[in-house]
Image: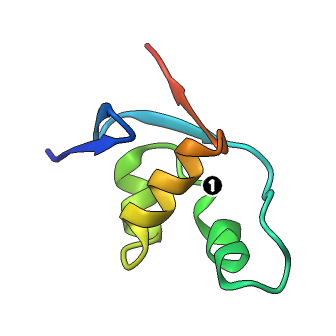
Amino acid sequence: MSEYAVNGRKVADSTKINFKANPKRAGFNAYKRYEIYQYATTVAELKEMNPVYFKADFKYDEMKGFIEFIEE
């Protein structure tokens, strides 16, 4: 199991997440990627759906509040 530091917060592959509706500008690559990975329910699924830009997109989306971490 992997752990990641995202904007000062440690999360694991098993951390549950929820995304807001796609807030990115249509026609851009980031929008297209978000359309695919916004359905991920864990960090591991997000990494699998967006392997190339996982770290950058995850950090940006968390910083902008597009991702909600679900505490159990």
| Relative image position of residue 15 (x, y in whole percent) | 37, 34
Task: Please state, as top left, top right, bottom left or bottom right, where the N terminus lies in the image.
Answer: top left
Task: Please state, as top left, top right, bottom left or bottom right, where the C terminus lies in the image.
Answer: top left
Residue plotted at (71% across, 69% down): 35
Residue plotted at (47% across, 55% down): 58
Q: Quadrant of residue 19?
A: top right
Question: Is 56 displayed left or right of 2 in the figure?
Answer: right
Question: Is 42 displayed left or right of 70 in the figure?
Answer: left
| Relative image position of residue 45 (x, y in whole percent) | 42, 55
Q: Quadrant of residue 30?
A: bottom right
Residue corresponding to mark 1: 39
Residue plotted at (46% across, 69% down): 49
Element type at marker 1?
A: loop
Q: Residue furthest top?
A: 72
- Is the image coloured rainbow, by chain, by secondary structure, or in one colour? rainbow
| Relative image position of residue 3 (x, y in whole percent) | 19, 42
Question: Is 16 displayed left or right of 20 in the figure?
Answer: left
**Type of amino acid at the residue the image marks with label 1:** Tyr
Relative depth, front residue between 70 and 23? 23
